Amino acid sequence: MKNHINNKLLVKDFTEDEIINILSCYQTDRKGLIKGIGDDCAVCETEGIDYHVVYTSDATIEDIHFKDGEIPERIGNKAIGRVLSDLAAMGAEPNWFIINLSLPKNYKIADLKSIYSRIKIVLDEYDSSIIGGDLSKSKKLAFNIFGVGKIKKNKPVFRSNVNANEMIWCTGQLGHSLSGRHLDFKPRIQEGKWLSEYGHAKSMIDITDGLIKDLDRLLKNKYGAILYEDTLKKMSSLNNVLYSGEDYELLFTSSTDPSMLLHSWKNLFSCELTCIGYTTDRLNIYLKNDKKINLVEIRGFQHF
């Protein structure tokens, strides 16, 4: 694998995960760093308080995450929602946000106000706020948003906590991003906090690059999974559910009794919760139906 990487010269030759692995080598492990590069958020310990501070960031860029001419409110909803979804995947409570804005000179100020109005509405719902940022001119509209949250000590839900013989669950319905829901989604902040606080989620991630790609990130070549094909088909076309990405739903594993988890969930939340499979000691991901079990190709949305 090392020789394979060394033979590559340009960014276009690498996958997103390979680039992240390269950049992670430049992280310095210091006192207070609980979780660094490689998860949905970084987690740091703060002395004298009973919670950890959680950091994350995300970019939302014209022609990559939204099209030219898109409704401004939908752009704002997605730009802030992407960052909030990362916090939700850790089980964290959002607090403060810094927005670095790249702005074309001919962009309408009224549309910019509409974008920020939507961002403010979303953040107000979670008692959070924009506290600063930076402005630069650009050919394309783009938002780089840095978010800070908090979570009680010993409560963050890391991707790496996955184990064999855990049930695999997802919130909401998967496979509808191509119909435009990637612009209108609601981040699962309250759901993520509850799953974390009561220990129901052992490992968790938000689905951005497709169910299979993000599930593979949870499994980390240590475990495998069996997915229920008939259950997934009820959500949308199987290909969309598995690979389309940008669902921004929570994907987590749990050892909680399924009937108890579902009962508690229905009493608290309006969004759906579905058991879609289970983890195994056997590597790879498989689709199971009444007749057979088929190996699934590991692929999804690539940023490069």
Image (cartoon, helix red, strand yellow):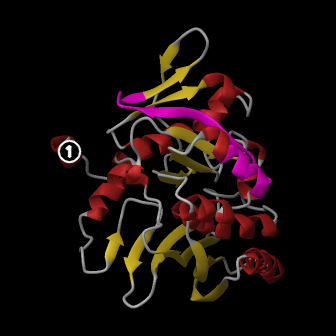
Q: Is residue 269 visible?
A: no
Q: Looking at the picture, does residue 148 appear above or below residue 291?
A: below
Residue 263 belongs to the span the image colors magenta? yes
Circle 1 residue: 7
**Quarter of the figure that contains the N terminus:** top left
Using residue 258 as the reference point, say whether residue 296 is left or right of it: left
Q: Looking at the picture, does residue 223 appear above or below residue 192?
A: above
Of residues 270 and 37, the one drawn nearer to the viewer in this rendering:
270
Using residue 188 as the reference point, say whether residue 202 is left or right of it: left
Of residues 221 and 184, the one drawn nearer to the viewer in this rendering:
221
Residue 262: percent from the left, percent from the top? Answer: 69, 44
Residue 250: percent from the left, percent from the top? Answer: 60, 52
Q: Secondary structure at mark 1?
A: loop
Residue at 43% x, 40% y: name it.
Answer: 216
Q: Is residue 236 visible?
A: yes
- Three-letter amino acid code at the position of disc 1: Asn
Residue at 80% x, 69% y: name it.
Answer: 73
Residue at 24% x, 74% y: name it.
Answer: 28
Residue 177 belongs to the span the image colors magenta? no
| Mark 1 Cα-neighbour bin, 10 Å: few <14, some 14–19, many ≥20 | few
Dividing the picture into quarters, in which one does residue 36 lie?
Answer: bottom left
Using residue 111 as the reference point, say whether residue 143 is left or right of it: left
Of residues 163 and 147, the one drawn nearer to the viewer in this rendering:
163
Residue 217: percent from the left, percent from the top? Answer: 42, 46
Residue 208: percent from the left, percent from the top? Answer: 57, 51
Q: Magenta residues, as a range?
A: 261-284
Dividing the picture into quarters, in which one does residue 231 lie?
Answer: top right
Residue at 18% x, 48% y: name it.
Answer: 6
Determine the residue located farthest toward the left in the rendered image.
3
Q: Looking at the picture, does residue 241 appear above or below residue 251?
A: above
